[in-house]
Amino acid sequence: MSSKIFIALGLFITTIAASAQFTKYRQFGIKAGMNISNVYTNAQNYTTKDVVGGTVSLSYDRVRARIFTFGSELNIIQRGYNNEVELTDDFGNMTSVVSLKNRFNYFTMPVKLGIQLGNAIYVFGSASVVPGMIISAFEEIPIVDQAGNLIGIDKQDATSNTTQFDLATQLEAGIGITRKNTKFYVSGAKQDSFINMWNTPSSTFNIKNTGFIVSTGIKWEFGKGLLR
């Protein structure tokens, strides 16, 4: 766990350093929100439902000509889905349907290119490549009797069964207001992964995360002299 934190921080700092000559305007920020998450899969008759998780972020952006932006974020984000499972008795007869939770916690670090227009009231948008790294995961396993009746649900650690690294794309748009050197904003982002979430052959069971992130945040803008 501690090594993953150091890796994530190292990548974030490297991105800041790589953008150091982009321009003189810099924006540091924090944001928080929720991720409405689900999956898409090649499995037949695999029914899933959306789940809501949280996300918190540190952000850093460079602004060129007051329009073009380049930056990154360091996020902790909760992903997951609920899947519907049919329970059966010893003769194969269906007795009920139960919804089971699958939850995944990730470090992610979007690398963003975008634009922002306006000042007192402004709009912005960006496109990102989003590498990620698993922190922890769990899944629920139903416990049934011989008659197929649900008698309990076992929550199991699934971190070792999860693909350790992820890669996704993200499109984000938002609107905000500026007060002196402080920017307040709200945004929405669509994120889609193209890496199998579970550590299984993709031809057998290929399941990928998709989600819509709603966030609110604050940025502080600095001119020449800070991380120049």
Image (cartoon, rainbow, N blue to C red):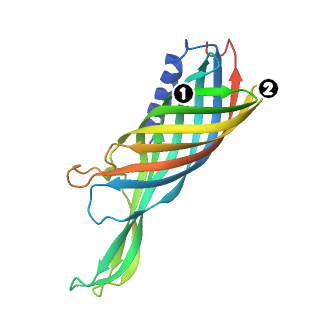
The residue nearer to you, when weighing 4 against 190, is: 190
Q: Amino acid under label 2?
A: Lys
Looking at the rendered image, the quarter that the C terminus falls into is top right
State the separation of the CA atoms marked 1 and 2: 22 Å
Q: Earlier in the sequence, mark 1 or mark 2?
A: 1
Q: Which corner quadrant of the image does residue 223 belong to?
A: top right
Residue 139: % across, % down: 39, 61
What's the mark number on residue 91? none
Q: Residue furthest right?
A: 180
Q: Which residue is mark 2?
A: 180
Residue at 39%, 75% (x, y): give it: 98
Residue type at numbered disc 1 = Gly
Looking at the rendered structure, the secondary structure element under dot 2 is loop
Q: Which mark's residue is nearer the viewer, 1 or 2?
A: 1
Residue 82 located left or right of residue 119 = left
**Quadrant location of the N terminus?**
top left
How busy is the neighbourhood of tag 1: few (under 14 within 10 Å), some, or many (20 plus)?
A: some
Query: 34 or 172: which is nearer to us?
Result: 172
User: How many C-alpha atoms fall within 10 Å of the one at disc 2: few (<14), some, or many (≥20)?
Assistant: few
Given residues 136 and 79, the one toward you in this image is 79
Q: Which mark is residue 114?
A: 1
Q: Residue at x 27, y 86 (%)?
A: 146
Measured from the top left, where is residue 200 in percent x and y? 24, 51
Looking at the image, the residue that sits furthest to the bottom is: 147
Q: State the image coordinates of residue 95 (x, y, percent, origin top left).
A: 33, 84
Q: Is residue 102 visible?
A: no
Q: Quadrant of residue 147?
A: bottom left
Q: Nearer the viewer, residue 10 or 57?
A: 57
- The correct choice, above or below, for 33 with respect to 82 in the image is above
Task: Label 1: state its secondary structure.
Answer: strand
Asked if residue 226 is positioned above or below residue 161 in the image, the reply reads above
